[in-house]
Image (spheres, rainbow, N blue to C red):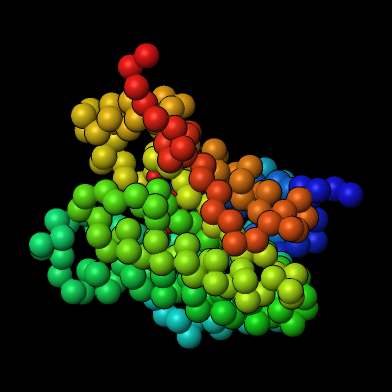
Amino acid sequence: MDWFRLDSKVAVVTGGSRGIGLAIADGLARAGAHVVLVARGEDQLADAVNSIVTAGGSAESIVLDVLDIAAGQQMIADVIARRGRLDILVNNAGMNIRTPSTDVPPEDFDRILAVNLRAPFFLCQAAGRHMVSVQRGKIINIASLSSFIGLRKIVSYASSKGALVQMTRTLSAEWARDNVQVNAIAPGFIRTDLNRKLWDDEAVLSWVIGNTPAGRLGTPEDLVGAALFLASPASDFVTGHVLAVDGGFLSGGTWPL
Ligand SMILES: NC(=O)c1ccc[n+]([C@@H]2O[C@H](COP(=O)([O-])OP(=O)(O)OC[C@H]3O[C@@H](n4cnc5c(N)ncnc54)[C@H](OP(=O)(O)O)[C@@H]3O)[C@@H](O)[C@H]2O)c1
């Protein structure tokens, strides 16, 4: 048994054009999967596909705004029709806007919930219908530390990521007997475009480093092992789990001794 091989598998990775999504897609491709990268920016998608193919992987891209639920569900149907299967869905596309809770406009709250929660659910639904029918599948939702702890000025984001974890648990229970595993990864503080400005602020950076037992920011590549585990036969009896990849932030305490 090749516990971590994904040969002949097909994976859809939303937000696969950069950052955490690209690192995960590259990791799945290196394990043998054909990866379908989904995002809005065409040029960055093309570069991402190129980098995976150059490394010997198999990849294609689809330009899509996950806010369009019908188009997202059609994308899943098209992949299944074209490739004959869909084994892995990684709901990674996400966004954040930092605002004090007293000032959050309704349209920002709605947009963040729509990208981070509504879109992943309806992609899970489309993928899940197929996976249940073939009695096999892996879904990985990218959650956050803010699924578990309250951090100031990100109330919409934290609400979406907290709910994403409950959605993951609910779907995992519903589809467990159909051999479809639904899990989440909670990344810690990772250096990507999403929060690049934060790491340019010395005070924020030193707070993160001081409060992360591993003593450093994460990189997108730090997420690959967890994603590979949850996408592969190695995790066939693991479902409804949230795997923190956070350098110990959630479980560790920092103290001066
Ligand atoms: N970085 C961290 O420290 C951290 C920590 C915890 C959780 N996360 C989560 O990890 C995931 C990836 O974050 P990241 O840091 O890698 O972010 P990133 O570098 O900003 O990448 C976001 C990806 O999502 C795509 N995307 C955004 N909105 C989209 C939309 N409406 N439709 C389709 N694609 C869309 C982007 O491409 P386009 O802009 O071209 O569409 C891009 O490929 C997110 O869910 C985030 O919440 C990140």
Image point (67%, 65%), residue name: 181
Q: Nearer the viewer, residue 53 or 241?
A: 241
Q: Which quadrant of the figure has residue 215?
A: top left
Q: Residue at x 74, y 74 (%)?
A: 177
Asked whether residue 41 is in view, the answer is no
Side (left or right) of 14 relative to 77 = left
Residue that lies at the very extreme toward the right in this rendered image: 1
Depth check: give the residue in front, 213 or 62. Answer: 213
Residue 61, located in which quarter of the rendered image?
Answer: bottom right
Q: How many marks?
A: 0
Residue 123: x and y in percent read 53, 75
Note whether residue 230 is visible.
yes
**Measured along the vertical axis of the image, is residue 138 above or below residue 171?**
above
Residue 181 against residue 149 in the figure, above or below: below
Most extreme residue toward the top is 257
Image position, residue 219 (x, y; %): 47, 37
* Quadrant of the image where one finds ligand 1: bottom left
Instruction: Name the residue: 47% across, 66% down.
Output: 166
In the rendered view, tell whether residue 3 sits above or below residue 59.
above
Residue 143 falls left or right of residue 62:
left
Q: Position of residue 231 (x, y in %)?
A: 68, 56
x and y, in percent, of residue 39 in the image: 46, 64
